[in-house]
């Protein structure tokens, strides 16, 4: 038996998202998304790239799925592109888009790979952004109609549903920090967008329960543990506690407890933030019963008090820990703490790690290999913590590596490589990396030795 063994039914997978991989920006009747618009504005993307071609998954999905099967992975997390289904965000459905996703899902099923479909992974139709986007309360109804269309058209082929991916990133990076589409810089606006995303999530779950479909449904939240940079400084201790409210509890309290943390809202209001209007029934809509809770996590943060960082007055500092090529620090013990904190405070029926992985400066060497020992070590250390969490009685049911292949990494463009599979963007040639072969052995053996 391996030193670190996993249950035989543990769900080993890899993850992706529509705008980051599909390409085919103008193919098959697809409409424009906010990322189509945002990525074409000079200066928004670090390397000047966009997702017009990305990994060309639209035309190469059979090749990619065959690689998934070759690696022995049991599940593939993908997302549907809202403007590929509804080019105008609502109204007439695009049959070509529906049929594309049916072909992908059938191919996965034919290869014995389970599908986990994310309904929203950030590519909002630009037509809806023109009507206010996530700041317009009507979007909850638009999203519900979109989700219902996916259930009706694809539900017979989907094994897991994920409603909204990382609402904090979509809201804050897109509406406060200006780093993501649509590129706004207003905290109050971001908080309103977050409330509507959570409502859309809940409305989609509620609608799903009426379909009679048997697949599981949940959501994926970006989370990390927040520690005081100096545990002996009361200001840093308080800053870390506030960051936990901002980063994690605002979203999880809403989903699992049917309320936002009153202390945090009061704090924001005192600092001049306009709070979203929470109407009767909103929190009941948000706090629907979930089949699983998805954690997306990559690092932990060490936080200091920072009076320049309105409205939370806290910022992360670098430590001496090893870092990935993006400067993200390895903190596997923080990963365990995060799983335990989630379990202890919210008691989800089960947790699935829906994203975890590391960026690297990867290339194909003269022998035709991609040697990425840093990623392999990252995966090993983080999987040791998953194994530890399972041993502690926390129901961790699956683990999805971000990402299956190198892809368009939002504001980083094509320069950040997270994939198990290397992509040459000029030729679209795929090369399996050494870390993927290691993970394949882990899956085959249901574990690994130190």
Image (spheres, rainbow, N blue to C red):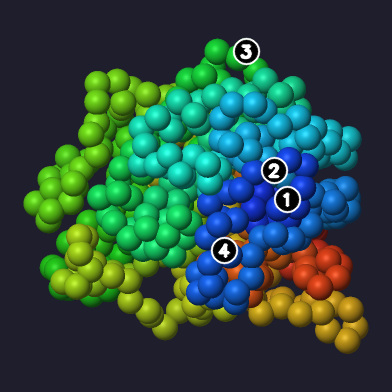
- Give x and y (percent) for residue 13: 70, 48
Q: Earlier in the sequence, mark 3 or mark 2?
A: 2
Residues at marks 1 and 2 touching, judged by CB atoms closer than 8 Å: yes
Q: Secondary structure at mark 2?
A: loop
The answer to whether residue 230 is above or below residue 208 is below
Q: Secondary structure at mark 3?
A: loop
Q: Which residue is label 3 attached to?
A: 212
Residues at marks 3 and 1 touching, judged by CB atoms closer than 8 Å: no
The residue lying furthest to the bottom in this view is 366
Q: CA distance from mark 3 to mark 4?
A: 39 Å
Q: Which residue is label 2 attached to?
A: 30
Neighbourhood count class around disc 2 (C-alpha, 10 Å): few under 14, some 14–19, many 20 upward: many
The image quadrant of residue 408 is: bottom right
Q: CA distance from mark 2 to mark 4?
A: 17 Å
- In screen coordinates, is 359 left or right of 110? left
Residue plotted at (37% across, 55% down): 175
Kindly identify which numbered label has been placed on residue 244: none
For the C terminus, which image quadrant?
Answer: bottom right
Kindly identify which numbered label has been placed on residue 26: 1
Q: Which residue is label 4 attached to?
A: 39
In depth, the one of 138 and 59 nearer the eye is 138
Residue plotted at (47% across, 60% down): 180
Q: Earlier in the sequence, mark 3 or mark 1?
A: 1
């Amino acid at each position: 038996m391996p030193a670190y063994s996993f249950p035989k039914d543990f769900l080993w997978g890899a993850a992706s998202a529509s705008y980051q991989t599909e390409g085919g920006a103008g193919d098959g009747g697809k409409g424009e998304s906010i990322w189509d618009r945002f990525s074409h504005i000079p200066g928004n993307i670090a390397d000047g790239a966009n997702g017009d071609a990305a990994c060309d998954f639209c035309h190469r999905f059979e090749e990619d799925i065959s690689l998934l099967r070759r690696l022995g992975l049991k599940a593939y997390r993908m997302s549907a592109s809202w403007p590929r289904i509804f080019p105008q965000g609502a109204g007439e459905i695009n049959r070509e888009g529906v049929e594309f996703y049916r072909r992908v899902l059938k191919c996965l099923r034919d290869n014995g790979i389970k599908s986990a479909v994310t309904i929203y992974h950030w590519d909002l139709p630009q037509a809806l952004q023109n009507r206010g986007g996530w700041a317009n309360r009507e979007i909850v109804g638009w999203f519900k109609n979109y989700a219902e269309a996916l259930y009706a058209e694809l539900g017979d082929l989907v094994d897991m549903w994920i409603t909204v991916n990382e609402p904090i990133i979509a809201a804050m990076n897109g509406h406060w920090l200006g780093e993501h589409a649509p590129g706004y810089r207003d905290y109050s606006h971001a908080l309103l967008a977050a409330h509507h995303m959570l409502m859309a999530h809940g409305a989609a779950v509620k609608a799903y329960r009426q379909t009679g479909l048997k697949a599981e449904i949940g959501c994926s939240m970006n989370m990390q543990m927040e520690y005081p940079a100096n545990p002996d400084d009361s200001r840093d201790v308080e800053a870390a506690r506030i960051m936990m409210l901002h980063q994690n509890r605002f979203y999880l309290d809403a989903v699992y407890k049917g309320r936002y943390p009153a202390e945090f809202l009061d704090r924001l209001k005192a600092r001049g933030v306009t709070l979203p209007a929470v109407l009767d029934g909103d929190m009941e809509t948000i706090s629907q019963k979930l089949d699983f809770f998805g954690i997306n996590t990559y690092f932990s943060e060490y936080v200091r008090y920072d009076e320049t960082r309105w409205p939370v007055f806290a910022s992360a500092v670098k430590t001496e820990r090893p870092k990935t090529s993006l400067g993200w620090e390895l903190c596997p013990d923080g990963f365990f703490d995060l799983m335990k904190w989630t379990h202890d405070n919210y008691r989800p029926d089960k947790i699935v790690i829906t994203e975890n992985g590391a960026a690297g400066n990867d290339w194909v060497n003269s022998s035709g290999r991609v040697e990425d020992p840093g990623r392999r070590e990252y995966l090993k250390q983080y999987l040791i913590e998953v194994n530890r969490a399972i041993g502690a009685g926390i129901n961790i049911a699956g683990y999805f590596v971000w990402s299956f292949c190198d892809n368009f990494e939002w504001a980083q463009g094509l320069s950040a490589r997270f994939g198990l599979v290397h992509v040459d963007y000029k030729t679209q040639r795929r090369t399996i990396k050494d870390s993927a072969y290691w993970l394949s052995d882990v899956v085959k053996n249901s574990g690994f030795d130190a």
